[in-house]
Amino acid sequence: MLPTQSTQFEHAALKNYLLDHAYDEMFKGPGDLHQHCELLLDHFASLPSEELQRRKQAADLSFLNQGITFTVYGREEGTEKIFPYDLIPRIITAAEWATVEHGLTQRITALNLFLKDIYNEGRILDDGIVPREVVYSCKHYRRQMAGLQVPRNVYIAVCGTDLIRLENGEFVVLEDNLRVPSGVSYMLTNRRVMKRIFPQLFRSYNVRPIEQYTQLLLGTLRSLAPEGRPEPNIVLLSPGVFNSAYYEHAYLARQMGIELVEGRDLVTHDNVVYMRTTIGLRRVDVIYRRVDDDFIDPLAFRKDSILGVAGLFNAYRAGNVTLANAFGTGVADDKALYAYVPEIIKYYLSEEPVLKNVETYLMTRPKERQHVLANLDKLVVKAVGESGGYGMLIGPQSTKAQQEEFAQKIQADPRNYIAQPTISFSRAPCLIGDELQPRHVDLRPYVLYGDKVTIVPGGLTRVALNQGSLVVNSSQGGGSKDTWVLSQ
Amino acid sequence: MLSRVADSLYWMSRYLERAEHTTRLLDVNLNLMLDESPLSAERRWQRVLQALGKPKDIEWTGDPYALTQSLIFDTENKASILSCIISARENSRHVREQISTEQWHRLNSLYLQVTRPEMQQQTQSEALANGMAQPSEFLQSVMEAVHQFQGVTDSTMNHGEGWQFIQVGRYLERASATALLLQAYHVDLWGQPERIVEGNEYLDWMGLLRSATAFEAYCKVYTADLTPDQIFEFLLLDEEFPHSVRFSIDSVQCALEKIQGDSGKSRAETLRRLSGRLHASLNYSSADDILNQDALGYLSSIQEQCRAIHETIYELYVDYSIQTALAG
């Protein structure tokens, strides 16, 4: 039984560790540890406060020196920031992970089938499982993709799905990121730093490795090469240094040993993509793109884009180059479409979804809209096209004026909003000052889909470092911690 | 190697070389100024501006510290030390996955050091004039940082194509700057051969040598016996001194050959001819011949040829037309 009111613990470092109704990643209840956390707590309790601070500083310094930063938009100076890092790892047991892995595999398989279907036969639309309007009114739907053959029918090669744990400890899907999901470099560097700072603790747990990720990613990309290109030239396409994830782009390119290119490095001729090198043009076969659809080809999409490559879409259509992820995958991570994913899984796989969705109200349905408008102070409202924690209303933490504003927005454009109950998702211990305090966390595992589905055990655990906050995005003051999946 | 990467490495290196050169000119002249009558100040600082290629919008107004301030911190002026360091760091940021971590650290901390707001206040011209601040410490630390950067570049980066582009950038900039420096001193040193030597000339000659870090190296070859003709010969034609024009062009030539070897192609004919001709001219000329004929013309022709080499490198490796590339 979880207590509903705050409880204190004996240890000094835990004096402000207050449990509430949210699931706690370390304690089952007052003084009652999850078994797999015993070693962890012992280890941290045995370290003097100065020693903890010393290691924390060593970790911070390591991030600083490596220049592991992200860019905050909308500020002139000091735009490069370090992503805050928490020292206490989050532990996931083998059994918990097996469920997550199964559920994610099921989900990405179904979503790929869905994308193939809606851009081709459209069976699911004919059968009325997903309403046509939801698909066609989505701003990420690309009519240019209709009837197009995609290599191996893989639309989503790289996916980052955000999971949270409900009060009963069950993992549920908060949202899918199917366009250009980021953060995997933090997952990898968190692990490297952790192994350096706490080698003994790490050794005492059987943690499954994640370092093979870049090699798996490279293999996935290679498996998607166009026919007749047995030794494909693979590149990573980045918008450039001004992009918030530029560090990650450079990191992944270096780790995979592939070229990091920008739009201006590429040219197309006769529907073939080339990169400009000092020895002339070199053909490009597979592009791991980290540029959104809208900006990738000024001829096909936004005319004003200077990040893209003119003619890229035609080369893609001609089958001379593969893009991961494919154009138009964004339709499947639209927040309104999200509500239909359980039905989509049942439709294509004839299986029950292993990972549930968070209950979602669609504003296009009058009854649900009425309910939401009457309960704005209790719900979370999200704009369907936004990400990164922008365009959100968190009911219980909002003012009357903000609620008014969202009510008007919803009525003006119901298709653009969804609402969900405010979930007090799970909390994990974090080192705040020199004591442990619980903070809300989510989990973003990275799913690869090529020859087969591969998920490295773990993912990026993001932390809402501000007390009580439910927003984990880096652009909103979030941090991250290492995620350990145990092998037994 | 991507054309854009080659371009960024080349410019990163050129900008740093330029920053170092400007820094040294300022340091040397601020120091020599102390030994000199205020009367000669005008001539000295005009010459500094000339040696820097007459930067746009920067003028001698009679205050050496105001001039120093704008040559260091004026970001409106693209040739100021700060502008050069910002540009070098920006270029390196675009190719961070291509340079070593050590290189990035060194350059990034130099950038953080010089862009600190309090750094500007410390070196405000009033603070300098009333002796509250010392520009020379600042200038020294910039020069040291650039030297360290060159050191880690040479010892931590693959000496492959990227490193060769760094070499080309550094030495092309240096050759051109040394030629310009000799040109700026020409009127005073070689313009009037019959002039009687006074005390102050010695300071001028030493200043010229030190502006190219050449004073000690010169003494090793010619002893402390400074004469304009020998200085001219040393800075222009010495085979072994890293700041001489000849040494610089040798290095450019050598790096270009490596790059052409790597790319294994014959379209580099024009570039080979241009750099070969300049290289040969410096290798087979004598200082006397040049001084007896049109020394100024010779020096500006060197700069002209450096420019032509730069443009040809661009056409060949960076900004080539797609049609040519597809045809090749």
Image (cartoon, rainbow, N blue to C red):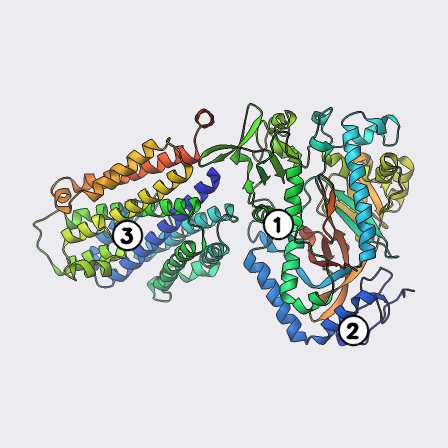
Q: Which residue is mark 1?
A: A72
Which residue in the protein does label 3 denote? B243
* Quarter of the figure that contains the C terminus of chain A: bottom right
Q: Is label 1 on the same chain as label 2?
A: yes
Real-space CA distance between mark 3 and mark 1, rounded to the nearest whole angstrom: 43 Å
The amino acid sitting under disc 1 is Val
Q: Position of residue B313 (x, y in %)?
A: 37, 36
Across and down, in percent, residue A127 comes to 88, 27
- Mark 1, mark 2: which one is toward the viewer? 2
Nearest to viewer (mark 2 / mark 3): 3
Residue A205 to residue A263: above or below: below
Query: Of the residues shown, which amino acid type is indicated by label 2?
Result: Lys
> Quick one: SS at disc 2?
loop
Q: Is residue A399 visible?
A: no
In the rendered image, residue B21, in percent from the top left (x then y), is placed at 33, 52
Circle 2 packing at 10 Å, graded few (<14), some (14-19), many (20+), is some
Front position in the image: A293 or A6? A293
Residue at the disc numbered 2: A15
Q: Is residue B217 left or right of residue A187?
A: left
| Number of on-image labels | 3
Q: Of circles 3 and 1, which is in front?
A: 3
> Could you give the CA–CA distance between mark 1 and mark 2, rounded to whole angstroms?
35 Å
Residue placed at 63% from the left, 61% from the top? A193
